[in-house]
């Protein structure tokens, strides 16, 4: 694949890892702690409550959320295959994988919206109960992350039309893949904490 | 750089020398919180957040260590002999 002339003059980082990957990991560490703080607050409220959920409030749809988990895991897998296609210099396979990952991400969001509408219809509103507030804040923040990841995947997929991938875009795809795997892992953690415990 | 380190050390030292009354408030709140159901929630939450932090920092350290080791192998560097 062609090299960007600017890349050859870039000095290696002191840590030995590439700078874009290191910066992404630091960003994702901050994101992880953001979710950890919110889940920490949720645990305080949950274990401090007399009954969870309070009487009269609906239970969370475990099966539907399990379906969402499978969908986002498949999306992560599709993007992983895309990165492998990128390393095998298969630009067409990469584009297909990017569209597949974005499509599965959109399906995940559709399932989340379905879940919210079911719960909202059952009387679980955003305000009034800590049960509803914590649930909508955690899942809503995660959905916002997922939406930004899908937009990023789609932008790369639409821009990538050539049968080769420039070095700069390879880095963008690697970073996007890391972010998307992060979104998937966070959802699996949220699924365990919100639905299974 | 040294000035910043010295300032950070000074702040930590002042924090360590804080009056006992302030620490007593921590103990009072802790005792009040630990007595009820909220105490259990706080404990679980602290363990969860601490575990996440340790996991995240460990992953980062492993990443940097592996990258450095691979970079050393790639450039053909040999580790310095011990005792020198």
Image (spheres, coloured by chain):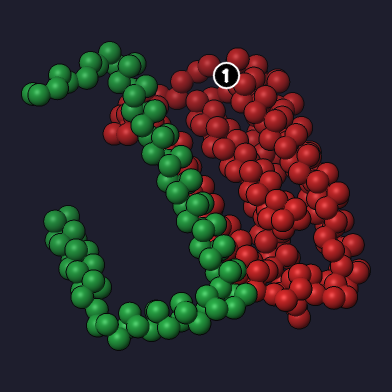
As helix, strand or loop, the secondary structure at mark 1 comes to: helix
Residue that extends furthest to the bottom in the rendered view of this protein: B21
Looking at the image, which residue is at 29% across and 34% down? A14
Residue A56 visible in the displayed image: yes
Q: Is residue B51 left or right of residue A9?
A: right
Looking at the image, which residue is at 65% across and 28% down? A80
Q: Position of residue B20 (x, y in %)?
A: 27, 82
Looking at the image, which residue is at 52% across and 75% down? B34
Q: Position of residue A110 (x, y in %)?
A: 83, 50
Q: Dot 1 surroundings within 10 Å: few (below 14), some, or many (20 or more)?
A: few
Residue under pointer 1: A87
Q: Position of residue A75 (x, y in %)?
A: 73, 36
Kindly identify which chain the residue marked by label 1 belongs to.
A
Depth check, front residue: A169 or A117: A117
Spot the green chain and give its letter. B
Q: Is residue B63 left or right of residue A174?
A: left
Quadrant where the C terminus of chain A sits is: bottom right
Q: Is residue A107 left or right of residue A79?
A: right
Res. A115 image quadrant: bottom right
Depth check, front residue: A97 or A35: A35
Q: Is residue B27 left or right of residue B39?
A: left
Number of marks in the rendered image: 1
Q: Position of residue B18 (x, y in %)?
A: 24, 79
Spot the red chain and give its letter. A
Residue A19 visible in the displayed image: no
Instruction: Give the answer, above or below, for where B69 lies relative to A185.
Output: above
Depth check, front residue: A134 or A144: A134
Depth check, front residue: A58 or A96: A58
Residue that extends furthest to the front in the rendered view of this protein: B35
């Amino acid at each position: 694949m062609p090299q960007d002339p600017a890349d050859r003059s870039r000095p290696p980082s002191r840590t030995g890892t590439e700078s874009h990957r290191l910066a992404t990991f630091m960003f994702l560490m901050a994101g992880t702690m953001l979710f950890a703080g919110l889940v920490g607050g949720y645990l305080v409220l949950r274990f401090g409550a007399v009954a969870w959920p309070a009487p009269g409030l609906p239970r969370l749809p475990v099966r539907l959320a399990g379906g969402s988990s499978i969908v986002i895991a498949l999306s992560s897998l599709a993007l992983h295959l895309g990165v492998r296609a990128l390393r095998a210099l298969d630009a067409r396979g990469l584009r297909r994988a990017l569209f597949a990952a974005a499509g599965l991400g959109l399906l995940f969001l559709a399932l989340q919206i379905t879940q919210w509408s079911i719960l909202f219809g059952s009387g679980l509103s955003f305000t009034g109960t800590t049960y509803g507030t914590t649930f909508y804040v955690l899942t809503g923040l995660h959905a916002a992350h997922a939406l930004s990841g899908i937009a990023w995947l789609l932008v790369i997929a639409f821009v990538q039309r050539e049968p080769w991938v420039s070095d700069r875009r390879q880095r963008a795809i690697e970073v996007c893949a890391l972010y998307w795997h992060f979104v998937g892992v966070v959802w699996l953690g949220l699924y365990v904490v919100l639905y299974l415990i | 750089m040294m000035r910043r380190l010295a300032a950070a050390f000074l702040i930590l030292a002042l924090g360590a020398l804080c009056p006992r009354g302030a620490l007593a408030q921590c103990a009072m709140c802790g005792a009040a919180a630990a007595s009820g159901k909220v105490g259990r929630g706080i404990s679980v939450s602290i363990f969860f957040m601490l575990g996440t932090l340790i996991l995240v920092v460990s992953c980062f350290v492993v990443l940097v260590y592996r990258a450095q080791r691979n970079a050393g192998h790639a450039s053909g560097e040999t580790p310095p002999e011990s005792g020198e």
